[in-house]
Amino acid sequence: MPPLPKRKVSKGRRDRRRAHDALKHSNLVQCTNCGEMRLPHRVCPNCGHYKGREVIDVERE
C-alpha cells in the first residue's frame, strides 16, 4: 500500500499552498500601427503589422 498522510491537512495550509494557482492577467501592448491592444511579440490580428511592417494581409469585410 502507498504511504498515507498522518493527519488531515488544515484548510489554511491547503489554501496557502494554492495561493500561487490563480490565473494571471494577460499582458497586452498597443499596436504601433492601428492602436489596438495585442499580445507582445505577436503579429497584430487587426492590421497584420509587426515591428513596423506588414507581415500578413488581413482580409477586410
Image (spheres, rainbow, N blue to C red):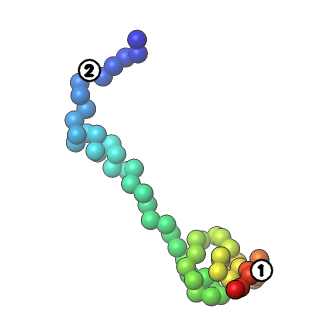
Could you tell me which residue is drawn at 22 percent across and 42 percent down? 12
Nearer to us of marks 1 and 2 is 1
Q: What residue did someone put label 1 on? A: 57
Q: Is mark 1 on a helix, strand or loop?
A: loop
Left of 49 or right of it: where is 7?
A: left
1 is higher (above) or lower (below) than 54:
above
Could you tell me which residue is drawn at 65 percent across and 87 percent down? 33
Spatial separation of the CA atoms under disc 1 and disc 2: 62 Å
Could you tell me which residue is drawn at 58 percent across and 71 percent down? 39
Task: Of the two numbered discs 1 and 2 on the same chain, state the one appearing first in sequence.
Answer: 2
Spot the residue most to the top.
1
Q: Is residue 52 visible?
A: no
Could you tell me which residue is drawn at 43 percent across and 60 percent down? 24
Q: What residue did someone put label 2 on? A: 6
Residue 31: percent from left, percent from top:
61, 82
In the picture, the quarter occupied by the C terminus is bottom right
Amino acid type of disc 2?
Answer: Lys
Amino acid type of disc 1?
Answer: Asp
Residue 11: quarter of image? top left
Left of 29 or right of it: where is 50?
A: right
Q: Nearer the viewer, residue 46 or 26?
A: 46
Residue 58: percent from left, percent from top:
73, 80
